[in-house]
Image (cartoon, rainbow, N blue to C red):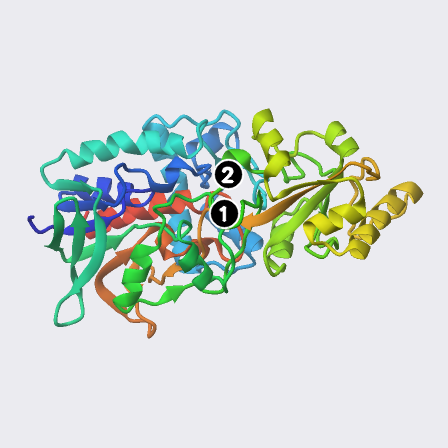
Amino acid sequence: MQDADIIIVGAGTAGMPCAIEAVAAGARVLVVEQADRAGGTLHVSLGQLSGAGSQLQRDHGITDTPAEHLADIARINRGTGRADLLKRSVAGQGATIDWLMDHGFDMDPACPAILHLHEAYLKARTYWGVEGGISVLKVLKPLFAAAMAQPNATILYGTRLVGLTQGPDGRIDGARLAGPDGEQTVKAPAVVLATGGYGGNPELFARLTGGRRLVTAAMPTSTGAGIELALEAGADLSCPDMFLPTYAAVAPPAGTTFIEWRQMPSLTPQVRQPWELHLDPTGARFVREDDDSVDRREHALNALPDLSFWCVFDAAAAAAAPPLLPGWTDQELAAAWAGHPSFVRAGSLDALAQATGMDGATLAASVAAYNDGIATGGADAMGRTHRPQPLTGPDWRAIRMHGMVLKTPSGIRVDDSLRALRPDGTAIGGLYAVGECIGGSTLSGLGFVSGMSVTPSLTLGRWLGKTLAGA
């Protein structure tokens, strides 16, 4: 195969826009994708976007600036994100929203909005398409296909990066690829890793997060292979200690890893107030269930050793409350209560404790204290204010929940030009990284910030493609 000017590994949220811009600027571009289709995590992502100063904001009379966006991010993540990369990305994110709209993005009419799935911004600068990540993909796919049809572009599907080649000076000068026709080496002065995170790799996840179990909605192809190959080439690891789980998913059976977004429980108080108690594995309350701060609930969950807790309620609460599992069909719920290990029913609190492994005395004390507060009108021990009715049984229910991930926190450490860095801070010539493979926490820090995964991938991907092509 002919050599290229730029090899882009990964045709996902960052790789596609990088290729689109590099091809448009005239560079000879080879894109390598291990799956049989483009899109990566956009196939499963909610596709949240954020950006200040977009035309949509102006149309809604919202005055906003990148400086305000940056300040809001720092408030949410306590200043734990990379300031230089945040500045580069946020400066262009409003224009990224406009770019999507110019290419027919099917924006949800509720946008821009203040979204409470993660810690909320102070201004309405969050956006999403009517089909989530698929709406973003529907914009990118025709642009990417048109770029790959150009004479200066090549796309190889079903092809994996198996190694990076280095010149005598240590500079990365190509890639070893394995595809349907065997292995080949392609030379290029620039290799861009846009390979995503490791949300589909339980072993790597455990290694990078202190042995914790992976519960994920990521694509199985999110293996972290690009990150591992960069580390083998001498790159440093970013954000090794910034893991934070999403609150939370129904725990899948032992030995399984993947969950569906459709089946996520409704645990956001701004959407559905809680009727249940959230109890740690001993049976003690560990969080204010109706806390309107997602960040506080996520950090409380992160403090639990195995990232798991029990949602405990009774049949009366189940009958009166809005659905806890609105995405589950009646048939799925019936099957889960009949045999799923995370769904437990019992005729008494003692029996519930035995079935779940909670301590009987601790469980009984937690329920009694909650009920006493309702009966007396006294303050709740955790500060909870939504206490619709006591939990008295006798038909007790418990669902085991577990912190989950879509994006992963660690990745390849890069400079503000997205060049991979060694542990001593020097750049590895010819090697670049963009998107989730630089670490989801590089920009979000130790917190979840709305729109700071997809939008930076699009924005920095486009910027890198133009920059490497000399545009």
User: Would residue 184 be seen by someone viewing this image from the given angle?
Assistant: yes
Would you say 214 lies left or right of 337 here? left
Instruction: Answer with the quarter of the image where residue 271 lies.
Output: top right
Q: Secondary structure at mark 1?
A: helix
**Type of amino acid under label 2:** Arg
Above or below, 380 relative to 446 = above
Mark 1 or mark 2, earlier in chain: 1
167 sits left or right of 384 in the view: left
**Element type where label 2 sits in the image:** loop
Who is closer to the viewer here, 226 or 337?
Answer: 337
Count of marks overlaid on the render: 2
Residue ID at (46%, 46%): 406
In percent of width and height, residue 265 lies at 60, 38
Residue 18: image tag: none
Residue 150 image offset from top left, x and y in percent: 13, 35
Q: Position of residue 259 (x, y in %)?
A: 49, 41
For this rendering, which residue is in front, 93 or 240? 240
- Mark 1 is surrounded, within 10 Å at the Cα level, by few (under 14), some (14 to 19) or many (20 or more) other residues, namely many
- What's the residue at 36%, 48% (across, down)? 222
Q: Residue furthest bottom?
A: 424
Residue 6 left/right relative to 425:
left
In the drawing, what numbered circle is on residue 125?
2
| Pointer 1 residue | 69
As measured in the structure, the alpha-carbon distance from the residue carrying label 1 to the one carrying label 2 is: 8 Å
Q: Local crowd at mark 2 within 10 Å, few (<14), some, or many (≥20)?
A: many
In-front residue for pair 184/22 = 184
Residue for point 63% across, 46% down: 400
| Badge 1 amino acid | His
Disc 1 vs disc 2: Cβ atoms closer than 8 Å? yes
